[in-house]
Image: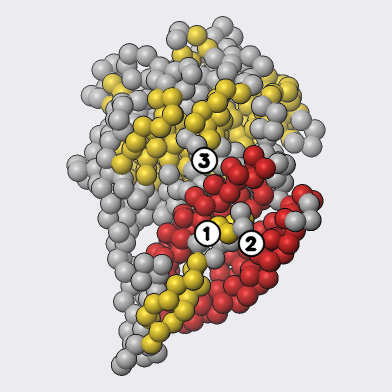
Amino acid sequence: MGRRRHTAIGVGVNTAFGLVLGVAVVTAEEAAPGEPVVPVPARQEAVGSLTAARAGHTATLLIDGRILVVGGEDGVGALTTVELWDPTTGTASIGATMATGRHDHTATRLADGRVVILGGRGGGTTLATAEVWDPATDTLSMSGGASGPRSHHTATALPDGRVLVVGGHDGTSFLSTAELWDPTTGTSVASGVLSEARANHTATLLADGRVLVVAGNVGSDFLASAETWDPATGAFAPAGSLVSVGRSEHTATLLADGRVLVAGGQRLVETTATAEWWDTTMGTFLPAGMLEHARYAHTATLLTDGRVLVIGGFRDFDLLDTIEVWDPTADAFAIDGTLAEARGRHTATLLTDGRVLVIGGLGGPDAFDAVPLATTEVWGTEPGNAGDPDSSTHASPGATASAEELRAVAEAYAGEVARFEVERERLLERVEEARLRGLPQFRRAWRILGDATRAHVGSVLTLPWPAALHADVDAWHRAQEGLGEVYGALSRVADDEELTRLMAQADAAGSSVAAATDRLRSRLGLPTGDS
């Protein structure tokens, strides 16, 4: 059969009149009715190394899909360098330079896309300073930091834009203090006191806005207690205790159903394989199976299908190369491949396409001879695709769906996109008109556009997507959430300087959305922006 021309509405970001328009119109060919639609296989990408070996660093997912790698130690001292890892090329490039080298710090992405880097160790001392990285300019600027030095603490981004900093060590003592860092002022204020001082703990943002703090250590005392911080009161309350053993350098992962999975960790003379989950409703811990290998200083990443990916770490004095997956249906762990290099104190970051990027850490034959690594590896979205010796990307193989399934969802998707395009054009006109009426109206127009966009995303997510496309839909959803964060920030914009920065963020977020949209459209057999 022949082919017909089709004008499709993609999801991208353009700028006009100084405003984010979020519209990309492309004209391309699509299969005519009755023609089979062939799914496009997942793309394979090469993964390069960092420019510098590092452990005790941070890796933060940016709105545009890149990864910001900050600081760490290289075996000689604390690093001042920042690197940007690009998922489209699989390579890292040097970015800005910090005023102070640091490791065992925190790096937290803010609502406007900037990243605040706080505390840590550097130059033989514990730091209180903070630096803020701006993605629009790839520059770092000093900001007001914590009220006092701290490392091995946690820093959690809250829904209102502030950052909750909890516990840690100040170089002399373990800390029970908590404070709120405000991105609008760059200053911190005290906010509650833990019932027990702790470092090397975890802090997890819950769906109701509270933050769950679990375990950690005070010297050789390994804690089993948990506490929740309540934003309504700015205070901590008891949240039960682990039923097995106290621990530090464990992981705590928020699950899709609201529970928190706590896995592994270190004790004074042993490493634990126990796992537990914390129930939000009951406020108590329950057993969640056993890891195949006891481990600490590992990573645990929530995957798009609800499973949790556990990678590497130490077991007593051994470095681990094993990968495990926790299945919420079976409530059990299972081995899922090996890394190319055993490592601990690394980072693992979920990318917008559903893969997991593993960066740096300590590697070697054992804990005694471990050295910082510059290598990176990518785990694919299908089980068993990690750890080939060439360290190349392992995206999920092209899953298949019937032509009928694809045609049905493609038709529904195109209809929803066309409907939303009409509404979006109308709302964009409102944004332009509101810009001339003053800041309150301008903010309100962005809020309305953001609400409409979220409703559109919700409608797309409810379509009858075949299982073969779930990873692509999830990646599209995450990219849209990044753009939604910018829309939210625009609804609170304060001045022209902030508007300029947010516009740059919107362009970057729109590029990420456009890439995810093109991949989804390709899988549906619809034209893309490159068609």
Q: CA distance from mark 3 to mark 1?
A: 16 Å
Image: 328 above or below 368? below
Image: 289 above or below 185? below
Looking at the image, can residue 169 be seen?
no
The amino acid at mark 1 is Val
Which one is earlier in the sequence, the residue at label 2 or at label 3? 3
The amino acid at mark 2 is Arg
Q: Which mark is residue 136?
A: 3
Q: CA distance from mark 2 to mark 1?
A: 16 Å
Which one is earlier in the sequence, the residue at label 2 or at label 1? 1
Q: Which mark is residue 454?
A: 2
Q: Give me the residue at 52% from left, 59% from top.
A: 13
Q: Give me the residue at 44% from left, 36% from top.
A: 68
Image: 386 above or below 329? above
Residue 346, position as x, y percentages in the image: 38, 31
Image: 358 above or below 36? above
Looking at the image, can residue 428 be seen?
yes
The amino acid at mark 3 is Ala
Residue 232, position as x, y percentages in the image: 79, 37
Residue 255, position as x, y percentages in the image: 55, 48
Q: Which residue is mark 1?
A: 13
Secondary element type, mark 3:
loop
Q: CA distance from mark 2 to mark 3?
A: 25 Å
* Label 2 packing within 10 angstroms: few (<14), some (14-19), many (20+): some
Which one is earlier in the sequence, the residue at label 3 or at label 1? 1
* For the residues bearing labels 2 and 1, Cβ distance under 8 angstroms: no
Secondary element type, mark 1:
loop
Residue 116, position as x, y percentages in the image: 56, 30
